[in-house]
Amino acid sequence: MGRFRKFWYLTRREKLVFVEACILLLAANLSVKILPFRHINSYLHHRSNRIRNALVRSDDIKNDINLVDLSLSRAANVLPCDSLCLSRSITKLIMLYHRRIPAVLFAGVKSLNDSSLAAHAWVGAGDCVGDANAGTENAEFTVLVRIGQEGLPNLSRNSA
């Protein structure tokens, strides 16, 4: 009952973004498990090319990015299946594209002490759209895959 009550007190916009995050996260989880990555990659590149010349609709990009992050986190906590970073990153990228916010998905690897590899995926959006190492936690990863917009103008004037 507590989860329903929390959902009930969300704003209408938060509810809609949360439901969108749930649906897309389920689809991304399923896609990662059953489709070859080349199909996912071509779909995301196609989406990226569709909004390349589009103007950002929102006046407050940072608030939209924060709402997408919050909704995605809520959806991952509520859904019964475990969502990997790749599924979350794909979902976040699609949600940001839907809002005409430029974003780039990065996938990279790092070597561990026991000679094994660790893989991770993350999304850069808004001011840090082109910076693969925007977060200090991602600085150790060597980027192998980059999906998204390249050569975008500086968005700091839009997000201030």
Image: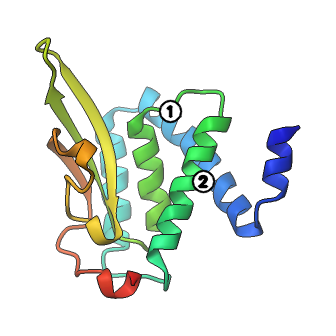
What x and y, as percent, mark residue 135?
27, 52
Q: Which mark is residue 71?
A: 2
Disc 2 marks a residue whose amino acid type is Ser
| Front residue (pair 71, 149) | 71
What x and y, as percent, mark residue 147?
26, 54
- At numbered mark 2, what does the secondary structure look like: helix, strand or loop? helix
Give the side of residue 69 with respect to residue 4, left or right. left
What x and y, as percent, mark residue 70?
57, 54
- Mark 1–mark 2 CB contact (< 8 Å): no
- Frontmost of labels 1 and 2 is 2
Q: What residue did someone put label 1 on? A: 83
Binning the other alpha carbons within 10 Å of mark 2 as few (below 14), some (14 to 19) or many (20 upward) gives many
Q: Residue at x 67, y 37 (%)?
A: 78
Residue 95 visible, this angle? yes
Give the side of residue 139 with respect to residue 23, left or right. left
Give the side of residue 24 with respect to residue 33, left or right. right
| Front residue (pair 109, 112) | 112
